[in-house]
Image (tube, helix red, strand yellow):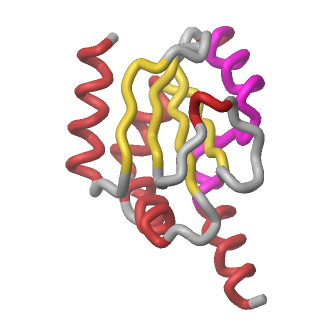
Amino acid sequence: MKYLWIVFALVAALSADLDWSNDYNKALSQASKEKKDVYLLITSENCRWCRKFENTTLQDEETIERLKLKYILLHIDRDKDYLPGKFKSKRVPRHYFITSKGEVIYSFLGYWDKEDFASFLLDVDKKR
């Protein structure tokens, strides 16, 4: 039970800084309206690398601002939330950058510190 409260507190803290959705279709609709792309983060409740990414990289102010500026944020728990089959992944954390039509721009796997994640964001920009 204690572990469950810790996970809940971490998710709540993460949600406070970044406005995450967990509804795939709603995120695509919002991205279309706001003329943004979608950053899709797929995690799992029992994934220690997911928690590390959330508690380090996604707590960095520059990373937060950059994500908020360019993307609609979609956080999916692969074991609980709806996700189209093309995004199903056994390994997490999994990162997708997609258009408002659901087309994949760029994807990668794993935990990345803020510097490496920033490098991936530059790679996404180059693909656009």
Q: Quadrant of the N terminus?
A: bottom right
Q: Residue at x 73, y 80 (%)?
A: 4
Q: Quadrant of the C terminus?
A: top left
The quadrant where residue 125 appears: top left
Q: Position of residue 35 (x, y in %)?
A: 56, 9
Q: Is 48 one of the magenta-colored residues?
A: no
Q: Residue at x 69, y 26 (%)?
A: 27
Q: Position of residue 20 (x, y in %)?
A: 65, 42
Q: Is residue 127 left or right of residue 12?
A: left
Q: Is residue 72 left or right of residue 66?
A: right
Instruction: Single out the residue that lies furthest toward the bottom.
Output: 2
Q: Position of residue 44 (x, y in %)?
A: 60, 60
Depicted 105 relative to depicted 19: above or below: above
The quadrant where residue 118 appears: top left
The residue segment tinted magenta is 14-32
Between 70 and 113, the one lying in front of the other is 113
Q: Is residue 105 left or right of residue 3?
A: left
Depicted 97 relative to depicted 7: above or below: above
Which SS does the magenta portion mostly show? helix
Q: Is 18 one of the magenta-colored residues?
A: yes
Q: Position of residue 126 (x, y in %)?
A: 24, 16
Q: Residue at x 64, y 53 (%)?
A: 15
The quadrant where residue 122 appears: top left
